């Protein structure tokens, strides 16, 4: 009977992970340890299924190497990531059967140092391609360009994009246009007059910032009688969204519209419960999560813009699969998902 990874690990006195890296040429490992592992694998007749071809012997030099795609996310605990992660996981399960391993590094915040550390880990472990939700900053921009130009690693951005890089393409919502759509909806509800508040998560998150920019541009162009009383950062926290709205409605009792471009949307309902309202402001939020769906059905918000998070995660990995396995590059630089506008009547 052929040997197993566990047997090799015990005989070599190393971990299963070290055996996996040595046999699949992934990451940094002591050359002497790698050589000992290879010798033990040959002696006990271990042949990885994904590398074994009909008629091949264990010692042949042309054994097929597993490919590895690295994934780096941000705001991993946010509700919109539920669907993104589901797409990543389903794609990962499919790619595993095709000899491609997907390694995901999750970051809970929008922190450039955490993201740089995740990229460094993936680079040291070894990767053939990268899918990333980049933080908008020079250090990440420089790192992506270094991976592409020096390491020849194809990079696809998804959900958030970053300008000035050599990345292959972006998969996600056209956030500028979605912001314009939100402004158009708000303008119709408010009949082109009144005060409106904008709330984003992190200003360093390009998705939220682009939505706000598109919203503001459309107000200026076609709804000049609407007054934007401010755009504030909530850090995607429910408590911050609640506080921002309460403070704004205290300062502007005639506030008629609220545009929440990122997370923490549950704070809208909590704010309305704290303020004595004869009529609540019109509200537009993002992402079709269970809580946001309930907010629509309960009448707390008027419109919800969904960004097809599942499609973003799934498509980013399949694009990279085509690039590293088939040499096929995407036809377009921007692979936009649909701007889906939901109301309580069509969720």
Image (spheres, rainbow, N blue to C red):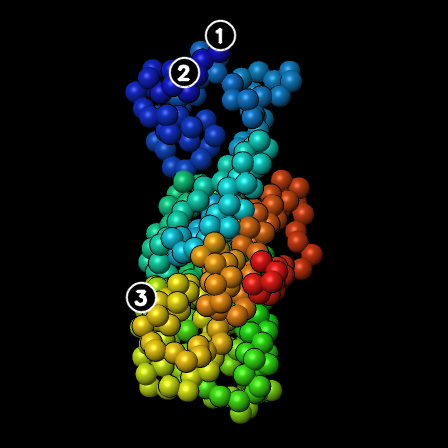
The residue where tag 1 is placed is 1
Element at label 2:
helix
When the figure is inspected, residue 232 is found, relative to residue 317, above or below; the finding is below
| Residue located 33% across and 76% down the image | 275
Q: Are marks 3 and 1 in contact (CB under 8 Å)?
A: no
Q: Are marks 3 and 2 in contact (CB under 8 Å)?
A: no
Element at label 3:
helix
Q: Earlier in the sequence, mark 3 or mark 1?
A: 1
Quadrant placement of the C terminus: bottom right
When the figure is inspected, residue 60 is found, relative to residue 227, above or below; the finding is above
Mark 3–mark 2 Cα distance, whole angstroms, equals: 57 Å
Locate residue 80, reporting x and y percent.
46, 56
| Residue located 53% across and 92% down the image | 225
Mark 2–mark 1 Cα distance, whole angstroms, equals: 15 Å
Q: Earlier in the sequence, mark 3 or mark 2?
A: 2
Locate residue 272, reporting x and y percent.
37, 72
CA neighbours of label 2 inside 10 A, class few (<14), some (14 to 19), many (20+): some
Locate residue 169, reporting x and y percent.
59, 58
Q: Earlier in the sequence, mark 2 or mark 1?
A: 1
Mark 3–mark 1 Cα distance, whole angstroms, equals: 60 Å
The residue where tag 2 is placed is 40
Locate residue 29, reporting x and y percent.
36, 33
């Amino acid at each position: 009977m052929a040997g197993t990874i566990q047997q090799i690990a015990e005989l070599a006195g190393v971990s299963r992970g070290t055996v996996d890296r040595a046999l699949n040429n992934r990451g940094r490992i002591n050359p002497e340890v790698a050589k000992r592992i290879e010798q033990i694998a040959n002696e006990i007749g271990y042949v990885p299924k994904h590398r074994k071809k009909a008629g091949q012997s264990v010692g042949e030099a042309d054994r097929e190497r597993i490919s590895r795609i690295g994934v780096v996310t941000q705001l991993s605990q946010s509700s919109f990531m539920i669907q993104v992660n589901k797409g990543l996981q389903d794609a990962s399960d499919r790619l595993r059967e095709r000899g491609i391993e997907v390694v995901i590094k999750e970051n809970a915040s929008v922190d450039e140092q955490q993201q740089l550390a995740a990229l460094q880990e993936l680079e040291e472990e070894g990767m053939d391609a990268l899918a990333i939700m980049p933080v908008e900053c020079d250090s990440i921009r420089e790192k992506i360009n270094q991976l592409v130009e020096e390491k020849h690693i194809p990079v696809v951005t998804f959900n958030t994009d970053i300008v000035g890089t050599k990345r292959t393409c972006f998969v996600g919502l056209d956030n500028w246009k979605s912001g314009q759509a939100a402004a158009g909806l708000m303008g119709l509800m408010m009949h082109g007059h009144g005060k409106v508040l904008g709330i984003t998560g992190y200003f360093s998150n390009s998705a939220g910032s682009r939505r706000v920019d598109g919203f503001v541009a459309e107000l200026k162009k076609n709804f000049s009688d609407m007054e934007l009383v401010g755009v504030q950062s909530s850090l995607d926290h429910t408590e911050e969204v609640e506080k921002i709205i309460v403070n704004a409605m205290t300062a502007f009792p005639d506030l008629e519209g609220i545009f929440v471009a990122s997370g923490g949307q549950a704070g809208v309902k909590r704010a309305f419960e704290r303020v004595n309202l004869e009529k609540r402001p019109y509200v537009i939020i993002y992402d079709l999560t269970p809580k946001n769906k309930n907010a629509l059905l309960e009448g707390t918000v008027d419109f919800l813009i969904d960004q097809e998070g599942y499609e973003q995660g799934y498509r980013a990995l399949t694009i990279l699969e085509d690039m590293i396995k088939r040499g096929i590059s995407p036809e377009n630089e921007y692979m936009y998902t649909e701007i889906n506008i939901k109301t309580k009547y069509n969720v």
